[in-house]
Amino acid sequence: MLPNTFSETVALTKQFALTEFDQAIKTQQLYYHNRWHIEAVQRRANQLFAIIAPYWQESNKDNQEPNDLTRTQSLLDLCVVTHDMVQVFLPQRHPHITRRRASGESEQATCDKLLNYIHQLNQDLKLAKNFQAQFSEKDIALLQLAILGTICAYSPVEEAIYQPALYNAERSPHIITRILALADISSLGMDGITTYNQEGSLLFLEENPDIIPFIQGQKIERLSTEQPKLAENFRQRLLKRARWQISFARSRLTRTFHELIGFPNEVIATLAAEAFPYLNAGTLRIVEKTTPTNSSTSLQELLSFFQLDQYLIKEQL
């Protein structure tokens, strides 16, 4: 049954995306990119939008339609639900290495799948002469730009990732792009250290699924004795993740305030105070103090810090 309103069209598209996503979560062992991540990004995006929307609406009042704010929020919600729908991993030549994604491939594949669905839905709505329920060309362009805006690049100087779309001097990102990008990677500043560390653990499980059978089979404790080379392999990967947690925290503390500049000037101070209460030097000091990064840190110490066994029990894909 075809939707009758634009809101119903968005809801139907969300349903499609979540169905596709749920299948990928199980088949690809997505311990991080799953419904939990969507809910976290949704919460952060809603908080940012609630603070920014009145200022944004006022600054654009001369060139907005009456329902622009509602439609913008609907498109933002759709971006949140769909932005990680497809995950493309590079082929692995060895079973005991971290699996990786090529920058931009997952986001482009997500756009391709989403836009194919939208174009077909628009065609069906056009045949039914229900034009008000269709996505406009502007809607489609905003969706694509926002999803592609979450593409991350690696800074070797910072040893951390960032989103180049937020640094486009020639074309300032739309509010949807900027909110989605910030909500996607701002867990430390917006939610605090516990959520930040949880994300690190879940990302490790997703990118290193070869460790899972050893944890679930309670073999990890004996690994140093029975398979010392593999134990060291896991230790090095966990140590690298721990160090990445610190370098990424430093990067977010440095970059986030610059990334807020694209919002209306009047709202930036409020955003920093209300939406990013943990984005400060004190939080960074705690992350640096509590995250084990010494070269001699044992496998057991790292496993204790990341609590992978507990997250495996909770997730149960």
Image (cartoon, grey):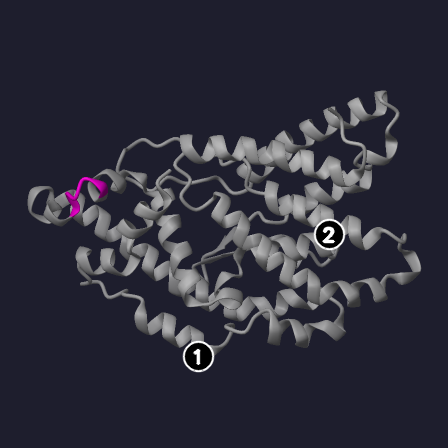
Q: Position of residue 136 (x, y in %)?
A: 82, 37
Callout 2 secondary element:
helix
Name the residue at 45% across, 36% down.
Answer: 25
Q: Nearer the viewer, residue 246 or 70?
A: 70
Front label number (2 vs 1): 2
Q: CA distance from mark 2 to mark 1?
A: 33 Å
Identify the mark nearer the N-term, 2 or 1: 2
Q: Check disc 2: other Cα within 10 Å, few if <14, some if 14-19, many if 20+.
A: some
Residue 90, can we see it? Answer: no
Q: Nearer the viewer, residue 316 or 308?
A: 316
Name the residue at 50% across, 73% down.
Answer: 278
Q: Which residues are magenta?
A: 216-220
Name the residue at 53% across, 61% down.
Answer: 186
Callout 1 secondary element:
helix
Q: Is residue 218 magenta?
A: yes
Q: Position of residue 110 (x, y in %)?
A: 59, 35
Q: Is residue 308 magenta?
A: no
Q: Quadrant of residue 223?
A: top left
> Mark 2 — residue?
73
Name the residue at 53% across, 37% down.
Answer: 106
Q: Residue furthest bottom?
A: 282
Q: Quadrant of the N terminus?
A: top right
In the rendered structure, the answer to whether residue 199 lies left or right of residue 302 reads right
- The amino acid type found where label 2 is placed reads Gln
